[in-house]
Image: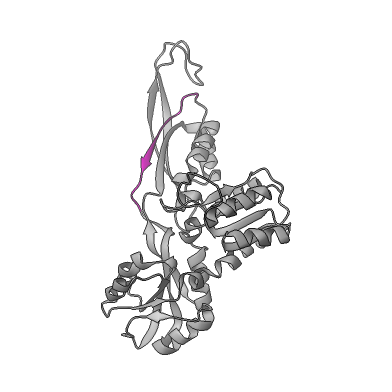
Amino acid sequence: MKIKDLISFIEEKFPLSLQESYDNSGLIVGSPHLEITNVLICLDSIEEVVDEAIDSNCNLIISHHPIIFTGIKRINGNTHIERTIIKAIKNDIAIYAIHTNLDNIIGGVNTKICDRLGLINQQILLPKENLLRKLTVYVPEDHANQVRNSLFDAGAGSIGNYKNCSFSSIGEGTFLPLNNSNPTIGLHGKKEKVTEVKIEVVFLKNMYQKVISCMKDAHPYEEPAYQIYKLDNLVNQYGSGMYGELKKPVQIDKFISSLNETMNANFIKHTKLVKDYVKTVSVCGGSGSFLINQAKTVGADVFISSDFKYHEFFLAEDDIVLIDVGHYESENYTKNLIYDILVNNFSKF
């Protein structure tokens, strides 16, 4: 298997369009055309991890955090980032990062945390905006099903737990073929009227090229008439953080004590225990302080994350218990998640 084959699967399941603007997920070092020997999974692709990859005959490292976040002006080995890149290139080791696109999706990092905590009724804490597009296309009536099914096959028409969703209406289309045209219907220089179906479907913006390509391939006209609209609708399957419920309320002190084992955390910081029992739990792997108010909005009793600054603890306002388990501890089980994705979908691993 080549690296590009694995990347294609990963990015179809966890699209790069879901990553935050500051992020740098994707193939960072190496050629996508390399044949994979073995894969090493880690949180941070530092120098020691490249050494481990060399010793383990792994020519692909899949890390959660990107080794490069911002631009690098020179690579001369003065920083751990530069040394890691140099060592990886010298040893033909590729480095791939799957970061906030793995955070911002059901089935990703925060789902893993929720599952470890035993939460039910899991939902995205802050659904994402600006992910949806709507395609409107006009098709001759006898080709409508063909075009509609092609759009569905491309992934358009999925809304929440439903697929193959569309809306159709019938109207009259007019056109006049010019001399250089090759009309499916009608003659040069003669105005035509055709009964057409207006098909409307929604799709994720990362599917744009595939959806438009499939629509054009299935459409009988050489110049299909269509429009793309940007939608402001929130998408509940994608976004930051998650929350859910314990099967039954647990005393707050017992809940916090259990986190030491559940999250493999040796040290936990938290605000005043203003709740006697915990029922609704919100989580965010990594740095999640930007979600404090959202956690309070959904009525969470506690919010588990990391990297809270001193003044951010005051935002609890005695409405919620903020729990900082540590950045590494909140994402440690991401390695297991990536491992499961590989071995459950590829028999070669």
Number of numbered discs? 0
Question: Is residue 10 visible to the viewer in this orientation of the structure?
Answer: no
- The location of residue 211, given as percent across then percent down, is 50, 40
- The location of residue 196, given as percent across then percent down, is 42, 31
Relative to 32, 229 lies left or right: left
Say if the magenta span includes residue 193. Answer: no
Q: Give the range drawn in magenta.
A: 222-233
Quadrant showing the C terminus = bottom right
The residue lying at 36 percent from left, 43 percent from top is 230
- The location of residue 199, given as percent across then percent down, is 43, 39
Which of 175/92 is in front?
92
Relative to 282, 114 lies left or right: right
Question: Is residue 75 visible to the viewer in this orientation of the structure?
Answer: yes
Residue 324, by quadrant, is bottom left
The residue lying at 28 percent from left, 73 percent from top is 315
Which of 250/201 is in front?
250
